[in-house]
Image (spheres, helix red, strand yellow):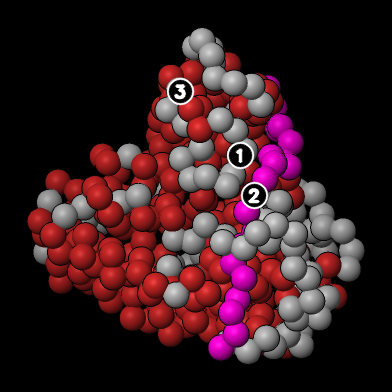
């Protein structure tokens, strides 16, 4: 498939194909199969689930419940009555869960020293923070060692966010103003293909999945991924959907862009080493070029100008950046630990043979978007 050809986007999600991981997610899925009615008090069950969890970021029931609740605001995640999106029965437990989740992150994410609240100082601090990141180098492993089976697993992990790229960060646009809003829109416009749907990053990634014989329907692999993979997206959703955390989502996007260009070049190398062509590597190649530009905009014009215009948000900007590095580091370490032990990095391993498809060979059923 040449780049000039139309690329079908990710297929629409029609049914919740994922399974409950505990009492809370089971109750949520049960409710969403029914019509919205009288308020149901889920707070006691949410509290029990939080109290039972040793670490929320690794708790399957907590993270799946948050994924479901945030998914109501996105669409194409859970097929249910739209009236559930703002139903009081679901908003209250979501607030309880995300409050506990945020508190755990703030307790466990190492905070850097705060710079002055000027654009140049914040950008410099963010480049220093991301440049010093000592997290696990999943990208180097993919470039040098990953097998075709592991590449398929890698895409499954990435699909939880990337088939929704860059929706979590876009929630921040109406919550920003002035220079920061303009910078966010500039970055997001590229993420969404600059008006060309076939160049939307989610659509390009869907083509990468199909190139390895994977199903590109959103939600298809939720059952397969561990809690920490869901936690990465849930953190973005929490930051983006809460206006008070607009600094955190700006810092997250800055760190995300600053740590993207070089790893994506390594990911592309790993896929080429395994015999895949440009139709599969396009997604990674695109990010090598785009994110080298985006990191400058995100650091100075987005995060830096936001801190300059709203100094009270400085701590959250740096927290969001540090949280991006930390949580993605936890997720990457999980994958590397499994692979180096000769095990699958998935909660439910894939059926054998998906990765052996020739590039462009599989297209999932459903309508393109």
| Crowd rating for badge 1 (residues with CA inside 10 Å; few <14, some 14–19, many 20+) | many
Main SS of the magenta part reads loop
| Crowd rating for badge 2 (residues with CA inside 10 Å; few <14, some 14–19, many 20+) | some
Q: Measured from the top left, where is residue 128 in percent x and y?
A: 31, 71
Q: Is residue 91 left or right of residue 36?
A: left
| Crowd rating for badge 3 (residues with CA inside 10 Å; few <14, some 14–19, many 20+) | some
Q: Which numbered disc, 2 or 1, marks the residue that appears first in the sequence?
A: 2
In this rendered view, identify the residue nearer to me: 97 or 358.
Answer: 358
Q: Reply above or below: 84 against 266.
A: above
Q: Secondary structure at mark 1?
A: loop
Residue that numbered label 1 is attached to? 78
- Residue at image position (74%, 36%) is 19
Residue that numbered label 2 is attached to? 13
- Residue at image position (53%, 84%) is 285
Q: Secondary structure at mark 2?
A: loop
Residue that numbered label 3 is attached to? 87
Residue 22: in magenta span: yes
Give the quadrant of residue 362: bottom right
Region rendered in magenta: 4-24
Q: Is residue 342 left or right of residue 168?
A: right
Q: Is residue 347 visible from the viewing direction of this image?
A: yes
Q: Is residue 171 left or right of residue 211?
A: left
- Give the alpha-carbon distance from disc 3 to disc 2, as whole Å: 22 Å
In this rendered view, identify the residue nearer to me: 346 or 294.
Answer: 294
């Amino acid at each position: 498939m040449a780049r000039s050809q139309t690329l079908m986007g990710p297929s629409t999600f029609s049914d919740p194909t994922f399974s409950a991981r505990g009492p809370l997610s089971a109750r949520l899925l049960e409710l969403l199969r029914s019509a919205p009615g009288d308020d149901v008090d889920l707070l006691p069950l949410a509290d029990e689930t939080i109290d039972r969890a040793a670490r929320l970021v690794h708790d399957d029931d907590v993270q799946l419940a948050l994924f479901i609740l945030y998914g109501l605001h996105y669409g194409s995640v859970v097929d249910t009555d739209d009236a559930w999106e703002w139903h009081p029965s679901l908003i209250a437990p979501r607030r309880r869960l995300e409050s506990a989740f945020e508190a755990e992150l703030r307790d466990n994410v190492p905070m850097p020293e705060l710079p002055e609240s000027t654009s140049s100082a914040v950008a410099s601090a963010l480049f220093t923070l991301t440049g010093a990141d000592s997290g696990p180098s999943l990208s180097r492993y993919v470039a040098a060692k990953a097998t075709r089976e592991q590449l398929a697993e890698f895409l499954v992990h990435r699909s939880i966010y990337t088939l929704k790229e860059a929706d979590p960060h876009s929630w921040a646009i109406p919550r920003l103003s002035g220079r920061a809003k303009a910078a966010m829109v500039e970055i997001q416009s590229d993420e969404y293909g600059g008006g060309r749907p076939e160049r939307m990053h989610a659509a390009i990634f869907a083509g990468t999945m199909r190139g390895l014989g994977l199903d590109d329907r959103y939600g298809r692999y939720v059952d397969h991924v561990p809690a920490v993979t869901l936690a990465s997206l849930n953190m973005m959703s929490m930051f983006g959907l809460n206006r008070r955390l607009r600094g955190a989502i700006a810092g997250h996007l800055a760190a995300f862009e600053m740590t993207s260009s070089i790893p994506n070049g390594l990911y592309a190398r790993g896929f080429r080493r395994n015999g895949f062509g440009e139709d599969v590597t396009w997604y990674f190649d695109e990010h090598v070029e785009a994110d080298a530009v985006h990191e400058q905009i995100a650091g100075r014009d987005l995060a830096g100008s936001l801190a300059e215009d709203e100094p009270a948000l400085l701590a959250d900007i740096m927290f969001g950046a540090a949280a991006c590095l930390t949580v993605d580091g936890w997720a990457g370490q999980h994958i590397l630990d499994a692979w180096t032990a000769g095990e699958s990095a998935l909660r439910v391993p894939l059926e054998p043979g998906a990765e052996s498809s020739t590039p462009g060979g599989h297209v999932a059923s459903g309508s393109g978007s």
